[in-house]
Image (tube, rainbow, N blue to C red):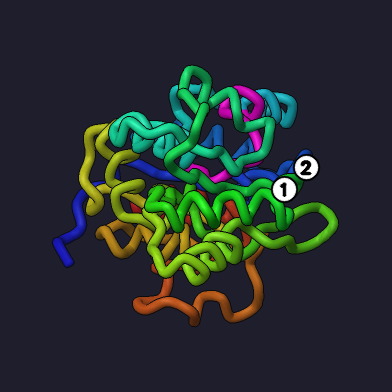
Amino acid sequence: MAARRALKAVLVDLSGTLHIEDAAVPGSQEALKRLRNASVVVRFVTNTTKESKRDLLERLKKLDFDITEDEIFTSLTAARNLVEQKQVRPMLLVDDRALPDFQGIPVNDPNAVVIGLAPDHFNYQVLNQAFRLLLDGAPLIAIHKARYYKRKDGLALGPGPFVVGLEYATDTKATVVGKPEGTFFLEALRGVGCVPEEAVMIGDDCRDDVGGAQNVGMLGILVKTGKYRAADEDKINPPPYLTCESFPQAVDHILQNLV
């Protein structure tokens, strides 16, 4: 691993780290203000596919988070970029609220499958349509492969199990664009002009947030909110740089030890 450099950027997960659906993690708004007062750039990286970036921003504003749209880097954006690069017409297996982020993308006579979190569309008929497209050679693009996520009523299945089911049934491999893919983190850092050794990632998903970030050379801080479960920190090697109770404690550590 390359030598650490002075900290320039902090990447922050959203769902499970700053908020859980329509409830903020206690103290997170004030902690974010304290982090912004340090000499670091803050960016927000998310795998959410349940809503468009615009809707996500509105949710965050209602929770009194001071965040602008250009500070958010989403896996939906990365998926759209890949679709445009490949010049394909996707079957969009995403929540209807996420469709605005694909506005202008042709979807008639699809020759690719893009899959995110789409609970209302994960039925046999729709998945079988995707299955047949893949058998005919269509590429499979997974916005991410998270196993599960946290809702206010408890843990819920993520898109990962459905992606893996389609991979298994068609003997193919998805191109994954969101966390924990290294290209996702590197693209987010490129936007702020720093290298991984100058950045920290804070998130509630040990594999996708922390593991993915550390695999490209960042420091990873795991918070025990959102989807965190006991002993999650033992599921990756190397283990997280730090495991703490919540985002405010992660900010305390950064301000006291890294800047």
Residues marked 1 and 2 touching at CB (< 8 Å): yes
Q: Which residues are magenta?
A: 45-56
Q: In the figure, is residue 120 to the left or right of 83? A: right
Q: Which residue is outermost to the left? A: 2
Vertical side of 8 occupied by 80: above or below: above
Quadrant including the N terminus: bottom left
- Magenta residue check for 121: no
Viewer-nearest residue: 80 or 209: 80
Instruction: Tell me the residue that label 1 is attached to.
Output: 20
Q: SS for tag 2?
A: strand
Where is residue 64? Give x, y as percent.
70, 27
Residue that appears at 49% across and 53% down:
144
Q: Where residue 9 sits in the image (x, y, percent)?
A: 34, 41
User: Could you say which disc has been placed on residue 23 in the image?
Assistant: 2
Residue 149, how many percent across, how many down?
Answer: 66, 58
> Which residue is outermost to the right?
153
**The label number, if any, that marks residue 69 in the structure image:** none
| Residue 66 visible in the shown view | no
Q: What residue do we see at 63% from left, 58% from top?
A: 158
